Image (cartoon, coloured by chain):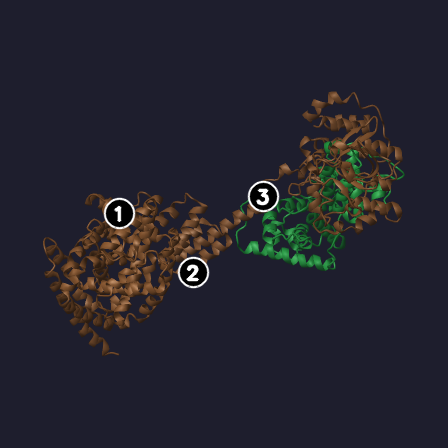
Chain colours: A brown, B green
Amino acid sequence: MDRDLLRQCLVYHGESLFSKLKCEQTENPDFQAVVSDLGIATNERKVTEKGSSLVEQFIARKADILFSPAWRTATPQEQDHEEEEAAEPYATMPPLELFMELSFEERRSMIYRDLEKGDVVVGRINNIREYGFFLTLICMAGGLKRDIVDLELSALCHVREIPSSGSHDDPLSYYQIGDFIRAGVKDIDRYQEKITVSLQQGSLCPALKHIKLGVITQEEMPIHYSRSVRAAADSRETYECILKSCHGYQNPSVVEYLLEKVGISDRHPPSMMRGLQSKLFQEDDFASAIRKKQSASWALKCVRAGVDHFKHGRHVEAMNEYNKALEIDTSNVEALVARGALYANKGSILKAISDFELALENCPDHRNARKYLCQTLVERGKQLEEQEKLVTAEGIYRRALSLDDSNPEAKEALHNISDLIQKSIRLREEALAKEQVKPKSSQTSAEKLRKILKEEKRMKKKKKRATSSSPSSSSSRCSSSRSSSSRKRSKKKKKRRRKSERGSKRHRRISSRESRKSEEDRKEKEDEEAECYPEPPNTSATFLNQTGGLMFGGEDEVAGRDREARKGGLLNSVSAASEEDDSDSSRRETKRRDGAERRTRTDEQSRSPQGRGRSRERKLSIERGRDDYRKDSESQRRSSFEENQARKSSSSSAEVEHSRKSSFLPEYSGNSCSASKQLERRMSQDSSSRNSFDGGRYENRGKKEEEPVKREKEAGKERSEVEGHTSGWGKVNAGSQNGQSGTGPKKELPANLLEIFNQIAQFEKKKGSQAKVPK
Amino acid sequence: MEGPSRRLSASRDGASKLLERRGSEGDADTETSRDTRTHFRVCRFIMEIGVKLGMHSIPVATACVLYHRFFKRVCLREYEPYLVAMSCVYLAGKVEEQHIRTRDIVNVSHRYFNKGSAPLECDKEFWELRDSVVQCELLILRQLGFHVSIEHPHKYLLHFLLSVKSLVNRHAWSRTPVAETSWALLRDCYHGNMSIRHTPQHIAIATLYLALNSYGVELPVGEKEWWQVLCENVTKADIHAVISDLLKLYDMEAKCV
């Protein structure tokens, strides 16, 4: 019990209350604790008033509530915003004593009693001296609201308390007699009745810090002052009239606002009734708690019904029930899990995963959700695997295992896919090794590349001269080679270039890390190189070749690095292209070119697959023709072979590992790259033994290639007959490669290839004629 | 169970189970005092579910006034008071722009009558209860002639509190929980029908007066008393009338609950 409060009350009510209290509160130990102190002060005053005994009875009975220290539900906010707020949130009333017509003396003594340091007053300057100016106080502007206009209160503002704007000026010169000044009370001498004020912002109490001190205009006077002036002038302006005419009184949320202002909680409202004490209310009985429980149980009922439907194979009904459950209770874990399971069953694996994930978010330990999510992830991983996104699939498997590290399926899948990735790397390496040998003998690809290069350079020359790496000399050198370019071939070229671009981008990214330190170095090397070889169109690729040659010591090391780099590259390619941080101008060019190529690509795609059969036919014939040509001009080519190699390597700078790999075999680098590319491409079109090469290839390309791949697949279906024949292609090739890789297989391989080409061509002719018939 | 259900006009079967009144009155009481006690209990019910529904003071007060006004026009024997109370809560939520969902009202009321019970299932019973609340709301509206806007003392009281506060030394004021007490008294006065018998200003002044009096806070007196300023036509007798009505309600609590 609040002893001071109780004493204050007893002083007011007198002895009779005390006896009633003693009577009513006998069982209250709190009262017994304080009662001994209370007896002294009681018998001073006796108020006899009508109904007072009833009130005393009430006080005595409710004393434990009234004087409980916990009765104060909240601390009122002391801040007084009224001057700052243009729209008054509640009725700002003139001081009550104005209407009560309190005597001058009483009001004066009250203001000296209640005025405190830090309050804000408004006054008019009536006298300026060299040590400061004197104010006649007009009204209060914060902290306390009193009617003081006629109290003849005078306050001194010392010159020290005036913030000076400049060092040389006399601060007092800014003030004139008659100015309205808003100032903070600095000190008050209650006995001598002297008030000193300050214009320093620091003199205000913290709650009033926002009020600006200094000269104010008539309009800036507090609202309650202007209202009290009106009320004083007109006796018809009663408190009630003013109250009802205020905007603030009509504010629909005035009650909430004022409750907060005076510090009463409306969520746990106070009451004198014993049955309504807020401690008696249990949180379980509140509407929100019941509703939550109820929703959960209703949703569960729906889920049960849904599961029942599901068991009987009525999937649509089951889905409806689950959705209803989730409508009732949006985060119902059971419903989410059940719906996820249904989705998974229906093959909507992504939806299933998102449901399970949401369920786990709400309830991280839900066993079924974990289990199902794990299984579904494995399922999804398999899907991705089928789509050749091995790395993504691997990530998915890893996630599945992180959810349930004992899941045998996920373990196995992860194991398999790791193997698969390793295998694809190995296969690619093998393919690389093979390619390094083959193109030397079969000059077709080299020739093709040369042409492509020439085309490219011509294009480049037209497009951008600004490129630092754009070789002006190489084109002239290249121009010696033939230039019979059919439309078909140019198209092919574009395709290839697109690939090479992508490759080179990656090159640049990787090389940018290494190259920063040796930028100058590179330039020099380039110059040197330009003397020996035609300058490659893509410097970074060349650079990589060179540095690779310089940096990598042994083959083992290279292989190891290779794998690492591949991984990095893969990750990079999976993530957005925005990661590329090369800032050189060639990047922009690449983009532009990319745009152009995309156009051509779509063009290409639109033609496939109907036109593919025929076009391939033509292509083959061209190749054959080229082979013939090759024989004619072999000697000529021989002479410029090394040049070509360099050029090819740069232009068709395929995947990182290709060039990396080739980098320590600089002789073969160009050929290997271009040829491998060509080979891959052909294989992806023609053969079903794609896996060996394509695994890596698709990964490297990333998502960009998804569509073409699909199209190729479609095309592949169409040509299922062909595949039967050509499926052995890779193996044959591999075999031949194995056989020839030893010493000098240059002469034998083209014959081998030719044989195969012829086979394919024959088949295609047959197939083409067959296909034409139904049309 | 059989008693109230016969009287239910809006919903015959559903509400009766829920709204079974507990305890029967002694026979010696006169009918009016028995009615007063019933009203006290029902108003207590309104206030309790009001707190549980998170309602503000004004909607709760409106619900109580609607309830009292309704039973001023009709006989208590004719209608089930608890159902009327639930509908009054629902209607008050609409009138005072703090919409309360019928589902919550039914849930909280169900819990009120069946302490510690599980929430209602989403079945026939629930929907019948819900429908009866909605239908009874229409009945109330018709009985009151669609006059449902009410002026409450709350706004007055809060403004009066601010005015009186600046008459008192701020330290003395912050030590004394006058605001809480007067607000509690104001909320409590809705247990009875005094809210429709006295003017809002008088109630506001009386609660403030009683709160100040309870703590022995003395205000300066000039030509006029503070309460005379706050309301022109209020007399000391008015204030005491309100206070004695209010104090009777506190006495009734001991008898009714």
Q: Is there CB contact under 8 Å for labels 3 and 1?
A: no
x, y percent for residue B126: 56, 54
Task: Specify the quadrant of the image occupied by residue B9.
Answer: bottom right
Using the image, tell me which numbered label, if any, was put on residue A547.
Answer: 1
Disc 3 crowd, CA 10 A, few/some/many (<14, 14-19, 20+): many
Which sits earlier in the primary sequence, circle 3 or circle 1? 3
Looking at the picture, how far across and down is residue B157, in whole percent? 76, 43
Of residues B32 and B61, the one drawn nearer to the viewer in this rendering: B61
Identify the chain of the residue marked 1, using the numbered disc in the image. A
Q: Which image quadrant for residue B240?
A: top right
Q: Indicate the position of residue A326 as horizontal and vertical percent values.
A: 48, 54
> Is A302 above or below relative to A517?
below
How busy is the neighbourhood of tag 2: few (under 14 within 10 Å), some, or many (20 plus)? Answer: some
Q: In this view, does B21 lie above or below A604?
A: above
The residue that disc 3 covers is A285
Q: Which mark is residue A317?
A: 2
Q: Mark 2: which secondary structure?
A: helix
Q: What residue type is labelled 1?
A: Thr
Q: Marks 3 and 2, Cα distance to the nearest angstrom?
A: 35 Å
Q: Residue A766's x, y, as percent? A: 17, 74
Tell us which disc is closer to us: 1 or 2.
1
Q: What residue type is labelled 2?
A: Glu
Chain-order first, disc 3 or disc 2: 3
Chain letter for mark 2, please: A
Answer whether residue A228 is visible to the viewer in this image: yes
